[in-house]
Amino acid sequence: MWDAFTRKLKLITEDETLRTRILFVLAALVVFRLLAAIPVPGINAGQLEAFLNNNQFLGLLNVFSGGGFSNLSIVMLGVGPYITASIVMQLMTILIPKLKEIYQEEGDAGRMRFMQYSRYLTVPLALIQAFGFLLLLRQNGILPTLDLMSMFTSVMVVAAGSMLLMWIGELITEFGVGNGVSLLIFAGIVSRIPQDIGQFIFSFDTAQLPAYLAFAAAAVVIMAGVVFITEAERPIPVTYARRVRGMKVLGGISTYLPLRVNQAGVMPIIFALSILLFPQMVATFLSKSAIAIVATLAQAVVTALGNQWVYGILYFVLVFLFTYFYTAITFEPHQVAKNLQKNGAFIPGVRPGPTTADYLGNIITRITLVGALFLGLLAILPLVLQGLTGITAISIGGTALLIVVSVVLDVVKKIDAQTSIREY
């Protein structure tokens, strides 16, 4: 195992193309961290810190923006608008068959068109979210009262910062290694590690040592579980029919089609958090409304979402549903069955065509149930620990751990695939 690792590491350092891709990713992440350090002027830092500490949802947004929200940087929205646009576009594939046809049946060209539509939708969403957050922060005394031109400028700067991050993420995907948006979220999370370690050392209490050890053990178990579920797959045997062309005999070989237990990866958690964040932001803003009934209803929504039971149930249900939804978007049994039939392949004991599609659909439904339950339980486990211990930082730390482990696994697999290609 060590020999294989050193061989791949040597190949990475010696191969110019792969080395350039990795260095490009690192350079892009450095640019992201520099942007996250450029603040919007006129901030009340003390008021902002108190506001974030009392709002779990905005605390999560701060984590995903790499701390950009804690100092109101020009990239305070992170990649949130782009993720929201992607969710809306994928939901629209259910309502508009033409979009589904573009995404699933037109190949790479169709996916590029679909991504272009998502970029177009990101622009108005970024403007709306920037305006909403700035108004919310002004209501809470974090930003001073801005005149029309200052507000317009601030909204344009914050929205442009989000669009810039979207562009950087797509550059990472195209010219780097791994998914660019996931890597930006990953960078935002790990950027807090030095600060968290410093706070932990400063507030270390020997009386809490058993609790610290218990949390460390839970983190190891969670990481092992994420690795196991992410790597778990159900192999479907596939046989290629033997064909004779001239003097050559083609086919006749047996292989397998790997169906992953968790086809959706970490995207259901990111989607669920994005959906939960939006109503909280709107309700918090409307709770300051001058209209009494609107303020009362908005405050009721804020109180309900602040309840750990309500939040936990909604979080679990959304993660569960998005796991099935994202799996249905990324894995189409009818398309897979069609491709197998075109290539003269079949599953032993199963008729080609619609019967194969039904067979694959039944299998993916059953194994996705395991992945969806696992992701949902892992998502609410930190909330359970928070309820038992009263430590509010656990809810953020647990979600961040899930995302970090999944992104690292994805990047390692992408690098491993690149090195394997070059070895052959």
Image (cartoon, rainbow, N blue to C red):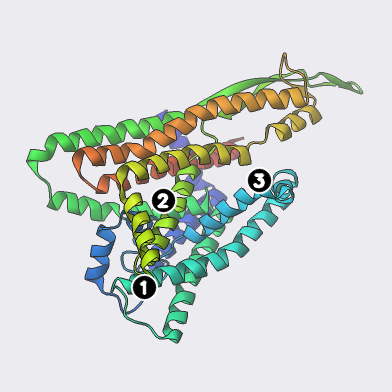
- As measured in the structure, the alpha-carbon distance from the residue carrying label 1 to the one carrying label 3 is 39 Å
For the C terminus, the quadrant is top right
Q: Which sits in the foreground, 372 or 207?
A: 372
For the residue labelled by badge 3, is the local secondary structure a helix, a strand or a loop? helix
> Which residue is under mark 1?
290
Q: Is residue 366 above or below residue 108?
A: above
Q: Earlier in the sequence, mark 2 or mark 1?
A: 2
Q: Is residue 102 above or below residue 206?
A: below
Report the mark closest to the observer, 2 or 1.
1
Q: Which sits in the foreground, 294 or 123?
A: 294
Q: Which sits in the foreground, 178 or 340?
A: 340
Determine whether label 2 and label 3 are within 8 Å by CB.
no
Q: Position of residue 108 (x, y in %)?
A: 70, 49
> Which residue is under mark 2?
186
Report the mark closest to the observer, 2 or 3.
3
Report the mark closest to the observer, 1 or 3.
1
For the residue labelled by badge 2, is the local secondary structure a helix, a strand or a loop? helix
Q: Residue at x 50, y 57 (%)?
A: 24
- As measured in the structure, the alpha-carbon distance from the residue carrying label 2 to the one carrying label 1 is 40 Å
The amino acid sitting under disc 1 is Ala
Q: Residue furthest left?
A: 207
Q: Residue at x 34, y 70 (%)?
A: 137
> Which residue is under mark 3?
94
Q: Position of residue 246 (x, y in %)?
A: 92, 23
Q: Which sits in the foreground, 136 or 33?
A: 136
Q: Is residue 229 visible?
A: yes
- As measured in the structure, the alpha-carbon distance from the residue carrying label 2 to the one carrying label 3 is 30 Å
